[in-house]
Amino acid sequence: MKKITSTIAMAIMAMTVMTLTSCEDVYISGELTGSDSKIWEGRISTYYEDRWGLTGDDYHTVIQFDSDDFRLTRGRGREVDYDIRDPYGSYWYSEFEWRVDKGVIELRYADTGFAPVYIYEYTLTDNYFSGYMDDGTKKDIMFKLFAINYFNWDSYFYNYAPRYSSPKMMPGNKNNTGSEKTKFGSKGKFVKVPERITE
């Protein structure tokens, strides 16, 4: 009888842990999206070692998480990253799907060639989001974002590509000579991608 009681107690504790994890995922999702598609703005910094030593890249980033009405811990989103050190003001626009599972936030960028990016060891409040991203490389990716009230996404998906279009249809920008400079690919792994300049 004692064994049956302890087995039942263990089963109840396991179900309680699973239920609490699920509630935590819903809470995290709610903080990411807010009541109506929260927008985050800040900086993403990558650090990695190459043959010359420690180096890195910095991006000014705007990310929006949209919730899925039917699945509380999933949704879609969009992100634009501005290369802080690029004299042309280049940027990368990406759309992604996200989900929260056991407290870990997973982003899958529209370019399915990239592995998912996992966000863990993070701090998330109503207006502050910081932590680390793991994209499967040896890069250390840190981010610090703050909630903002508004960002005009129109120029990213109305003037350049339809909403939720192919990730290869990236927005371009004008350089000093007036020619269009376009970046191809998604920034999912924060790589510098080849450029094509058209006259």
Image: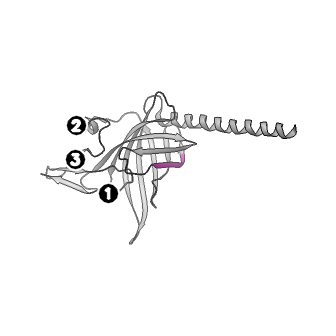
**Residue occupied by mark 3:** 173
- Report if residue 50 is visible in the image: yes
Instruction: Point out the residue furthest to the left here.
Output: 199
Upstream in sequence: badge 1 or badge 2: 2
Residue 3 falls in which quadrant of the image? Answer: top right
Instruction: Look at the image and say whether residue 121 sits in the magenta stretch.
Output: yes
Give the spatial CA distance, label 1 vs label 2: 23 Å
Q: Nearer the viewer, mark 3 or mark 2?
A: 2
Q: Which mark is residue 159?
A: 2
The boundaries of the magenta stretch are 111-122
Judged left or right of residue 34, residue 51 is left
Q: Please report contact status of discs 1 and 2: CB closer than 8 Å, yes or no.
A: no
Name the foreground residue: 172 vs 58. Answer: 172
Upstream in sequence: badge 3 or badge 2: 2
- Residue type of the residue flagged with mark 2: Asn
Judged left or right of residue 70, residue 164 is left
Name the foreground residue: 98 vs 180. Answer: 98
